[in-house]
Amino acid sequence: MNKIIIKNARRIKHLEFSLPERKGVYLLVSPNGGGKSTFLTILHKICNGKAFAEKFKSSSRDGNIDDFRDTEITYICKDGTKATFRKGEKRWVSKPKDNRRVLENFGYESSCFIEADPKRIAIKNDEIKLGKRIQVADEIKTLMCDWFSEEDFRKLEKLKNAKGRGRGGEYFYIIEKSNGRSYSEKHFSTGELAIVRLLTQIDSIAHNSLLLFDEAELALHPKVQLKLLEYLREKSEKKDLTVFVATHSVPMIENTDPNNIFLLEKSETKPISPCYPALALGSVLGLDYSNSCDAIIFVEDEMAKLVLEKLRDYCIKIGCENRVSQIFARIYPVGGYIQTADLANKVKASSPNKAFVRAVLDHDVYERYEKEKSDPVKKYEYHNFMEEHKQCLCDLGCVPERDIISCITSKTELKDKIKRDYKVDPVSTTSKVRKNGKGSTIYKKQFKELLQRIAGGNVREEEAVKHELVEKCIPFLYPEEKARQIIGKIFAAQKD
């Protein structure tokens, strides 16, 4: 895996970043001043030798202003070769001096850096003159019509204004009206102007390239932000692009897979990934999760969320106290148990008189805590964690994939029901998964294998099967008394 190590580059003190091997669209998320633009410039250097000279400039009059002399940026290829860049007295130098092979081995054809600068939305002051008209790609016209619900974009063209022999020219977007008159980009909305320029840039990018996009949401309505995100995904797939989008966009973050979100935290030397949208938005925007709900419940991942939802439904069905069904709760997957508890504490402190807050952790955290208590040599890592977060912690009472796999392969009644309903033997199916790696990883792979076998490779069907399987397992994971205890503690009070 290709890797970049960054030291003392503007706001980034130390960051180690392994580039994803999969093509796709990845979001870079951090608060303002978190280093997103700096990081995009460092990625741009892979294919643009002048990137540092253009973007990391020091004052020519006073070397202490915008000083990069302590900056060190190392590019490491998967084959172990590396190149380190430092700022010399006048220019950036690398070791080894011939760094081209190292950067070429990252495997990208080119890079396109769409910066968050006035060029994205600025209206040109030049006077528009008669000139050659150039057709705009049909795809761009169709997208403009769709995204802005404006059929006029079907007649979008580019008008070239020559500047004189050898001086190139300036291009303006124009739209011809039915009466023979035209209007130019000078009268487009800011969002329309930003998008038509973006689409033109992206349309021309080479296959197998890096597309780097700073503040993608600039001047765009949330609906258009989502359409842009989907368009980037389609382009990434068609052109084998690796796309990094630096953003604070709520709709973009909410609609991105956790595996495709990188959260840059100043206190961390590596980005947090996978990163669930709840953690990203909480860290970046400090969102008020308590709006329009009675309870805010943070869990470790999507499976924990599904188990908790099905457990609550089960408790209502068997007759828990009325308040369990009356409380309107929002459940957010976050990530690791520490991030889950930290976010719960943060939200609890920011909304003390609103909804009550819980961090519901997988049971293996409690298992480790109990094991630690019985070993006097341990440093009480879990004990200290429990004490620090005790006001909001609750136990889910199971480790989702591990305990579900255990149930469906050992409980005869459940095993027979799955065989009968799906015509699949859960024991033989899960046993085919190789038993290498960490325990939690193995159980996740086994559960995934079972879902795929039942759903026949249909992704949408997999999601439905997952819900059905969890629902079938709940009574076996949680006998009635245990179910009441777990849910009772989570919903113990409407205010902390």
Image (cartoon, rainbow, N blue to C red):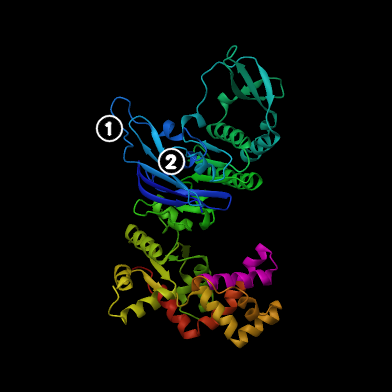
Asked if 262 appears above or below 370 in the picture, the reply is above
Gap between marks 2 and 1 measured at Cα: 27 Å
Query: Foreground: 63 or 465?
Result: 63
User: Residue at point 39% right, 62% down?
Assistant: 339
Label 1 is placed on what type of residue?
Asn
Which disc number belongs to residue 64? 1
Q: Position of residue 191 (x, y in %)?
A: 54, 35
Quarter of the image with the C terminus in it: bottom left
Q: Is residue 170 above or below residue 289?
A: above
Which region of the structure is painted magenta?
441-466
Tell me, yes or no, if residue 308 can be seen here: no
Determine the residue located farthest toward the bottom in the rendered image.
Answer: 412
Q: Which is nearer the eye, 1 or 382?
A: 1
Residue 444 shows in the view: yes
Residue 144 lies in what quarter of the image? top right
Q: Quadrant of residue 147?
A: top right
Query: Sequence-wise, which precedes: disc 2 or disc 1?
Result: 1
* Left or right side of 69 for 210: right
- Foreground mark, 2 or 1, reads 2
Left or right, 386 with respect to 37, comes to left
Instruction: Tell whether position 474 is magenta.
Output: no
How many neighbours does mark 2 have within 10 angstroms: few (below 14), some (14-19), or many (20 or more)? few
Q: SS of the residue at dot 2?
A: loop
Determine which residue is flagged by label 2. Answer: 96
- Whether residue 218 sits left or right of residue 371 in the image: it is right
| Image location (x, y in percent) of residue 234 | 64, 47
Could you say where residue 297 lies in the image, as x and y percent from the top left?
A: 43, 66
Q: Residue at x 32, y 37 (%)?
A: 69
Queried whether the magenta region covers residue 454, the answer comes back as yes
